[in-house]
C-alpha cells in the first residue's frame, strides 16, 4: 500500500487550511455590491395569509426591495419538487402538494417563508423584516403523524386527501400472515423513532448573483450535491437553463443529509438578484432559522410483529409504519421511509416472509427528509429492538438468538428487494463479544449493583445499504435521477494530476482519500494530486455525496478514468522505450519495462503526451480521461455494536461505560478517516438515543426545541471514548471492494443504547431520547 | 455608531460600527478574518471562540465596543509563519476535525484550556471543559485525543506553551 497508498493512515491534506482559519465557506464569500436577504417567516403552524403590507418595510433605511409569494408567482417561478415517485398500493402516484419558494395564500409550518426583504446590510434587512405587516387567519394544525389522518385533522394540501401522501407496501402479506398464524411465539412491539434535527454546525447559506451582460446566474450554496441543485433549479424551478446557471458549493461545514436538498432560499436569492438588477443577494441562516427550515429526520410511528418457530427461528415479520414527511415533500423525502427503510427490514437475518406497509403523511411541521442513515436507522432500530425484546421474552441469550438467525451464505436474496452480496455477521459479533468481555458481564453487573447502580448491556447487529445504486434499478423504483458518479483525471504536462469528481466533500476527507487512490496507482505522491469538486463550471456533472456513496461509487469512477489514463500512458511509454505495451508497468512515479532496466519518469510520459512530438501513429495528444461509473448493486456494510451502560437509579442518569463497534466496511482506503466517520456517527446515534428529540406543541404547532438551548446536542462529556475496529469481507460489486462507512455509526448505535438501558433497569421499552427523567420515571414506575 | 479600535493578531483595526455590532462581526467583516465562525445564536456552539487579552471568549456574545482597546487572537493568528501551534498540529495529527467549521473555536478553546491547566489535563477534564464547544462530525473522540496530546507536549516543552 505504501505510506500514501490505499490502506494507509495518511494525515489529511485539507486540514491545513481548516486549522489555520483559511477554509473558504459560503458565508466567507462577499461578492462586490452584495445585498442581504432576511426572510419574514410564519409564526403560525397553519394559517391563511389575508394580507401583506410591505409599505413600511420598503421605506426603511437601506431597503432595496421587499418581495412576496405573489411576486414569485407573478414571475412564473416554479415550486420545489420531490424527485422520487412512490406509488400507493392501488397503483396511484403519491399525492404531492405544491411547494412554492415563498408561501402564497397558505402557510403550513412555523418558519414557512412569507416575504423576503433585500437591503444594503444584514442588519437593515432584519430590521425591515420586522416592519412587514401580515394578517393571518389561524387554522387548526396537526403535528402528530398518528393523528394526521383523523377525521377532524385539518387538510394541509388540497392534493392529498386526509393528508395521506401515499399508502405503500412491500413484501408478501399472505405469506407473512400465514407465518404469524403458524408461529410458536410472536413478539409485538410498538416503536417510535424520534424526530431529529441534523444540525451541521455551519448553517445554510445562499448567494444568488445574476450577470445581466451574460444573462447568467451563479449560486454559491452550502450543498452536498451542487449539480443536482443546478438540475432542479433549471429543469423544475425554471431559474435558467443549465448552461446559464453555475452552482458552487465550496467548503461546506457538515451536511448529514440536510444539505442534499434544494431549499426555497436558494431559489429566492437567485430570482431576487435578477429582480433587483443583478446585485448579488446573500442569505445566511441563523441557528433558529436552521431549526425551523433545515429538513428534519426520522419521525416514524411503527407497530410490528415477529413470528418465531419452536426452535426460535424467525419465520415472519410484519410492520406497519406511519412516516411524518412534514408540511411539504422535500427533494428525496418519499424514498426514505420506503426504499431506504423497508428494504432493510430483514436485517442480518434469514427471514422467509416479510410484509411492510408505510403510510406517509403531511403534518404542519418542518419537512422531513434524509438524515444520516435515512430510513436505515429506523429499520435497524425496529429490528434490533425487536430481537432484543424477543430474546428476553423467549428466554434466550440475545447474542445466541441473533447468531441462530444470521444469514450465513451469500448472495442472499431477502423478501424485500435487497440481495446481500457479501458479509460475515458472526465474525463481527464474535469480535465484539470478545472486545466487551461478554463472559464477565454478570460480575460487572453485580459490582454495579453493590454500589447502588444498575448495569446493562445492549446489542445491535445492523446492516445497511449504501452506494445507492444501479441507476436502472432505482429508476424502476421511482427515482428521478440516475445514481452513478463521474470522474475526470487530468494529467498535467509536468506529471501532476487533477481529479475532478462529482462527489462532494464536506468533512469526509476526499482530498486525501481520493489522492491516496491516485497515488496507489501511479506512485506520484498525494501532494501531486489535486481533488476538484463542488463547482458545476469545473466538474461536468455529478450526483454528490450522501448515502455513504463517495467511496464505493465516486472512487470507482476515478478507478475507471485512471484505467484509461494508464492505458494511454503505457502506449506512449512503449512507443518511447521501444517496448511491448504489455510489458509496461507503472509504479513509484516511474514507467518501466518489466524485466529490463528501462524506465522513465511518469512526468516524462505526461510531457510527451502534451508536446505531441513523438506519439504512436494516429494517437491524439494529451492525457486526460473521464468516466461514469454506475454501480452494479447496493453495497451492504454491516456490524455489531455493543453498548454497556450504568444507570444511577436515584437520578436516572445513564453513563455509557463502554461502546464497542465492530464494522465490516469491506476494503478501507484510510483507516484514520474511517474511524473518524464511525465516531461521528456513533455520537449522532447516541445523541438520538439519550439526548436529542424534536418537541412540538401539539395544539399550536410551535417548535419548542428551536435552539441549542432547548435541543440537546451531544457534548464531549456526554460521550465515552469509542472502541472501534473492523473485519473485512470484500465487496464484490465495485473495483475497490469498498462498502461505505459514513452512516453506519448513526444507524447501528441507537438500539444498542436502548437495549442496554432496558436491560439495566428491567423494562420492556423506553422512548428515545432516554433522558434522566424518563429513565427515573421508568425505574420508579411513574412512566 | 461607536468607534472601536482592536488589535487583532498584532494588527490594529479601527472603525465606526453600529453599537450593536458583535465582536465576531467586527472580526469577520471589519478585519476580514473569516476563520472565526458563527454556528448558533445562543452562545452554545463555540465556533466563534477567540482569545481576548489571552482569555477565551465567545465573540458572538460580546459587543465589539466591549472589546474596544483589547487585543484579540483569532485562529489566523495562532501559527508562527509556517510553524503550527502545537494545538493546531495535534488536531491535524489526531484527525480532530472533519468539516472544519467548529475547528477554529475548538482550537482556541483548547489553547485556553491548556493555559488554565498547567498541571496537565486528563480525559475527564478535557471532556468537561469542552462543554461550550459543539462538534457534529467527530464525536469528540479525536478532539479529546488531540487536546490531550497537545497538553502533554506543551507541558513537556514549556517554551512552546507561551
Image: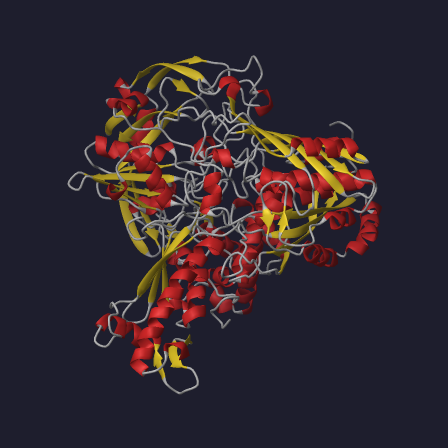
Which scheme is used to colour this image of the protein? secondary structure
Residue A453 at x, y percent in the picture: 79, 43
Task: Check the image and name the residue furthest to the bottom.
Answer: A597
Task: Check the image and name the residue furthest to the left.
Answer: A213
Give the residue at x 77% y 30%: A181
Residue A423 in view, yes or no = yes
* Left or right: where A307 falls relative to A611: right
* Left or right: where A570 falls relative to A165: left
Give the residue at x 49% y 23%: A364
Which of the two residues, A69 or A174, is positioned nearer the viewer here? A174
Residue A74 at x, y percent in the picture: 26, 22
Residue B87 at x, y percent in the picture: 48, 60
Q: Is residue A47 above or below residue A249?
A: above
Q: Is residue A103 above or below residue A388?
A: above
Which of the two residues, A185 or A654, is positioned nearer the viewer here? A185
Residue B143 at x, y percent in the picture: 54, 55
* Left or right: where A271 falls relative to A548: left
Badge count: 0
Give the residue at x 59% y 52%: A637
Q: In the figure, residue A560 lies in which quadrant?
A: bottom left
Which of the two residues, A527 or A573, is positioned nearer the viewer here? A573
Q: Is residue B79 above or below residue A483?
A: below
Q: In the figure, residue B11 lies in which quadrant?
A: bottom left
Image quarter hosting the C terminus of chain A: top right
Q: Is residue B137 above or below residue A213?
A: below
Residue A190 in view, yes or no = no
Amino acid at each position: 500500500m505504501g505510506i500514501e497508498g490505499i490502506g494507509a493512515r495518511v494525515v489529511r491534506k485539507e486540514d491545513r487550511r481548516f486549522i489555520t482559519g483559511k477554509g473558504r465557506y459560503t458565508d466567507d464569500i462577499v461578492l462586490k455590491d452584495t445585498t442581504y436577504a432576511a426572510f419574514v417567516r410564519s409564526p403560525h403552524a397553519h394559517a391563511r395569509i389575508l394580507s401583506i403590507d410591505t409599505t413600511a418595510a420598503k421605506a426603511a433605511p437601506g431597503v432595496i426591495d421587499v418581495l412576496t409569494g405573489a411576486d414569485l408567482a407573478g414571475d412564473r417561478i416554479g415550486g420545489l419538487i420531490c424527485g422520487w415517485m412512490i406509488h400507493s398500493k392501488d397503483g396511484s402516484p403519491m399525492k404531492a402538494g405544491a411547494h412554492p419558494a415563498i408561501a402564497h395564500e397558505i402557510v403550513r409550518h412555523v418558519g414557512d417563508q412569507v416575504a423576503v426583504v433585500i437591503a444594503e446590510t444584514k442588519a437593515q434587512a432584519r430590521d425591515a423584516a420586522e416592519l412587514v405587516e401580515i394578517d393571518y387567519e389561524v387554522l387548526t394544525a396537526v403535528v402528530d403523524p398518528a393523528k394526521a389522518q383523523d377525521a377532524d385533522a385539518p387538510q394541509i394540501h388540497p392534493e392529498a386527501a386526509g393528508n395521506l401522501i401515499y399508502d405503500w407496501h412491500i413484501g408478501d402479506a399472505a405469506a407473512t400472515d400465514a407465518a404469524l398464524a403458524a408461529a410458536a411465539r410472536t413478539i409485538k412491539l410498538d416503536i417510535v423513532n424520534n424526530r431529529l434535527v441534523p444540525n451541521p454546525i455551519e448553517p445554510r447559506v445562499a448567494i444568488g448573483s445574476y450577470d445581466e451582460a451574460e444573462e447568467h446566474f451563479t449560486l454559491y450554496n452550502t450543498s452536498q450535491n451542487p449539480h443536482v441543485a443546478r438540475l432542479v433549479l433549471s429543469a423544475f424551478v425554471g431559474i435558467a437553463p443549465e448552461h446559464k446557471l453555475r452552482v458552487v458549493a465550496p467548503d461546506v461545514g457538515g451536511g448529514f443529509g440536510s444539505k442534499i436538498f434544494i431549499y426555497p432560499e436558494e431559489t429566492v436569492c437567485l430570482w431576487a438578484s435578477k429582480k433587483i438588477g443583478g446585485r448579488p443577494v446573500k442569505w445566511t441562516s441563523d441557528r433558529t432559522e436552521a431549526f425551523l427550515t433545515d429538513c428534519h429526520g426520522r419521525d416514524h410511528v411503527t407497530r410490528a410483529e415477529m413470528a418465531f418457530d419452536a426452535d426460535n427461528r424467525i419465520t415472519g415479520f410484519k410492520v406497519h409504519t406511519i412516516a411524518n414527511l412534514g408540511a411539504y415533500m422535500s427533494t428525496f423525502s418519499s424514498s426514505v421511509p420506503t426504499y431506504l427503510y423497508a428494504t432493510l427490514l430483514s436485517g442480518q437475518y434469514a427471514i422467509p416472509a416479510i410484509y411492510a406497509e408505510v403510510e406517509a403523511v403531511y403534518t404542519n411541521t418542518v419537512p422531513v427528509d434524509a438524515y444520516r442513515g435515512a430510513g436505515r436507522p429506523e429499520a435497524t432500530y425496529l429490528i434490533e429492538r425487536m430481537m432484543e425484546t424477543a430474546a428476553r421474552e423467549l428466554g434466550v441469550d440475545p447474542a445466541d438468538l441473533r447468531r441462530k438467525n444470521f444469514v450465513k451464505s451469500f448472495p442472499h436474496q431477502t423478501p424485500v428487494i435487497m440481495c446481500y452480496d457479501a458479509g460475515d455477521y458472526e465474525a463481527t459479533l464474535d469480535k465484539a463479544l470478545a472486545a466487551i468481555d461478554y463472559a464477565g458481564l454478570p460480575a460487572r453487573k453485580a459490582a454495579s449493583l453493590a454500589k447502588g447502580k444498575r448495569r446493562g448491556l445492549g446489542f445491535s447487529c445492523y446492516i445497511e445499504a449504501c452506494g445507492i445504486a444501479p441507476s436502472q434499478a432505482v429508476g424502476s423504483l421511482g427515482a428521478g435521477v440516475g445514481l452513478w458518479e463521474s470522474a475526470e483525471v487530468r494529467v498535467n504536462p509536468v506529471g501532476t494530476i487533477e481529479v475532478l469528481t462529482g462527489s462532494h466533500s464536506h468533512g469526509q476527507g476526499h482530498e486525501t482519500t481520493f489522492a491516496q487512490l491516485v497515488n496507489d496507482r501511479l506512485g506520484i505522491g498525494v501532494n501531486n494530486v489535486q481533488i476538484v469538486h463542488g463547482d458545476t463550471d469545473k466538474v461536468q456533472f455529478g450526483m454528490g455525496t450522501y448515502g455513504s456513496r463517495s467511496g464505493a461509487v465516486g472512487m470507482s469512477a476515478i478507478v475507471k478514468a485512471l484505467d484509461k489514463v494508464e492505458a494511454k500512458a503505457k502506449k506512449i511509454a512503449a512507443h518511447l522505450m521501444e517496448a511491448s505495451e504489455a510489458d509496461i508497468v507503472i509504479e513509484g512515479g516511474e514507467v518501466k519495462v518489466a524485466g529490463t532496466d528501462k524506465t522513465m519518469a511518469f512526468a516524462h510520459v505526461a510531457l510527451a503526451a502534451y508536446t505531441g512530438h513523438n506519439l504512436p501513429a494516429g494517437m491524439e495528444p494529451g492525457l486526460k480521461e473521464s468516466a461514469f461509473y454506475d454501480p452494479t448493486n447496493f453495497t451492504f456494510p454491516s456490524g455489531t455494536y455493543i453498548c454497556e451502560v450504568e444507570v444511577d437509579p436515584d437520578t436516572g442518569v445513564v453513563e455509557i461505560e463502554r461502546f464497542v463497534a465492530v464494522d465490516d466496511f469491506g476494503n478501507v482506503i484510510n483507516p484514520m478517516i474511517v474511524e473518524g466517520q464511525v465516531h461521528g456517527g456513533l455520537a449522532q446515534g447516541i445523541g438520538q438515543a439519550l439526548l436529542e428529540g424534536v418537541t412540538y406543541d401539539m395544539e399550536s404547532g410551535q417548535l419548542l426545541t428551536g435552539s441549542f438551548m432547548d435541543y440537546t446536542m451531544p457534548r464531549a462529556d456526554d460521550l465515552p471514548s469509542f472502541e472501534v475496529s473492523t473485519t473485512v469481507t470484500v465487496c464484490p460489486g465495485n473495483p475497490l471492494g469498498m462498502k461505505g462507512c459514513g452512516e453506519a455509526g448513526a444507524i447501528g448505535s441507537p438500539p444498542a443504547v436502548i437495549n442496554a438501558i432496558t436491560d439495566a433497569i428491567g423494562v420492556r421499552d423506553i422512548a428515545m431520547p432516554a433522558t434522566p427523567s424518563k429513565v427515573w420515571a421508568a425505574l420508579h414506575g411513574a412512566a | 455608531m461607536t468607534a472601536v479600535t482592536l488589535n487583532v493578531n498584532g494588527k490594529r483595526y479601527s472603525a465606526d460600527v453600529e453599537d450593536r455590532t458583535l465582536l465576531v462581526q467586527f472580526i469577520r467583516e471589519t478585519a476580514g478574518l473569516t476563520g472565526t465562525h458563527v454556528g448558533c445564536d445562543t452562545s452554545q456552539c463555540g465556533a466563534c471562540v477567540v482569545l481576548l487579552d489571552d482569555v477565551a471568549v465567545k465573540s458572538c456574545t460580546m459587543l465589539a465596543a466591549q472589546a474596544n482597546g483589547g487585543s484579540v487572537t483569532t485562529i489566523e493568528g495562532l501559527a508562527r509563519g509556517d510553524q503550527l501551534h502545537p494545538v493546531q498540529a495535534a488536531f491535524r495529527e489526531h484527525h480532530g476535525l472533519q468539516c472544519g467549521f467548529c475547528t477554529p473555536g475548538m482550537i482556541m478553546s483548547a489553547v485556553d484550556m491548556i493555559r488554565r491547566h498547567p498541571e496537565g489535563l486528563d480525559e475527564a477534564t478535557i471532556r468537561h471543559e469542552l462543554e461550550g464547544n459543539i462538534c457534529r462530525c467527530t464525536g469528540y473522540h479525536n478532539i479529546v485525543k488531540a487536546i490531550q496530546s497537545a497538553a502533554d507536549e506543551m507541558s513537556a516543552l514549556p517554551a512552546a506553551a507561551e
